[in-house]
C-alpha cells in the first residue's frame, strides 16, 4: 500500500527551491529504534521507493523486531499527459514525494541484533536514490 495523504490543504504545490547543499536540522537522531538508515544526499523520495525499502527490511527481518518509517510523502508532484502541448495550465497530481536533505533518518529498526539490522538496512539502502549510512544508538 503506497503512502499518500488523506486530505491536503492545497492540492497543487509550487516546486520549491533546490536545497542540495543544505543540511537537515530535524529528524537527524535516532528516536525509536537502535539502528537507523541516514541519508547522505538529497533527492525527492517518492512513496514507491519508501515502500520498496520497507518491504526489503521486513522481508529480511522475517517479522522479527520493529520497523519505523521516519518520512511521509506529502508533497504533490504534478504531471501532464503524454504528447500534450505547452500551456493550458498545470497538470494533475501524479504522485507524492518527501524532499530529503542530507542527515535525515529514513528508517529505524529495534528489537534485533546488529548483524540482522545491518543486513536489512543495507538492502533498503539499495532502494534509495542517494547514498546512505548506518546509524547506531550510543
Image (tube, rainbow, N blue to C red):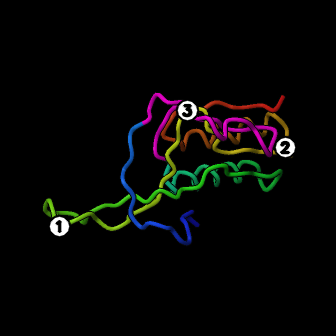
SS for callout 1: loop
Front residue of this view, candidates 8 and 46: 8
Q: Residue 102 has which mark?
A: 3
Give the labeled residue for mark 1: 88
How far apart in space, not on screen, are marks 2 and 3 (Cα)? 26 Å
Quarter of the figure that contains the N terminus: bottom right
Front residue of this view, candidates 60 and 69: 69
Q: Nearer the N terminus, badge 3 or badge 1?
A: 1
Left or right of 34? Residue 122 is left
Front residue of this view, candidates 131 and 23: 23
Q: Nearer the N terminus, badge 2 or badge 1?
A: 1
Q: Residue furthest front?
A: 9
Give the labeled residue for mark 2: 112
Quarter of the figure that contains the C terminus: top right
The residues colored magenta run: 19-44
Is residue 37 a member of the stretch shown in magenta?
yes
Is residue 98 a member of the stretch shown in magenta?
no
How far apart in space, not on screen, are marks 2 and 1 (Cα)? 53 Å
Residue at horizontal 44 percent and vertical 32 percent from the top:
20
Amino acid at each position: 500500500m503506497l503512502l499518500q495523504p488523506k486530505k491536503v490543504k492545497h492540492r497543487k504545490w509550487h516546486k520549491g527551491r533546490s536545497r542540495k547543499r543544505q543540511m537537515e536540522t530535524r529528524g537527524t537522531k535516532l528516536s525509536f529504534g537502535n539502528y537507523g538508515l541516514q541519508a547522505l544526499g538529497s533527492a525527492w523520495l517518492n512513496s514507491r521507493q519508501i515502500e520498496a525499502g520497507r518491504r526489503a527490511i521486513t522481508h529480511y527481518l522475517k517479522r522479527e523486531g520493529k520497523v519505523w518509517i521516519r518520512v511521509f510523502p506529502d508533497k504533490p508532484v504534478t504531471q501532464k499527459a503524454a504528447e500534450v502541448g505547452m500551456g493550458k495550465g498545470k497538470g494533475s497530481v501524479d504522485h507524492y514525494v518527501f524532499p530529503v536533505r542530507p542527515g535525515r533518518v529514513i528508517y529505524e529498526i529495534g528489537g534485533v541484533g546488529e548483524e540482522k539490522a545491518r543486513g536489512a538496512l543495507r538492502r533498503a539502502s539499495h532502494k534509495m536514490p542517494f547514498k546512505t549510512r548506518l546509524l547506531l544508538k550510543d
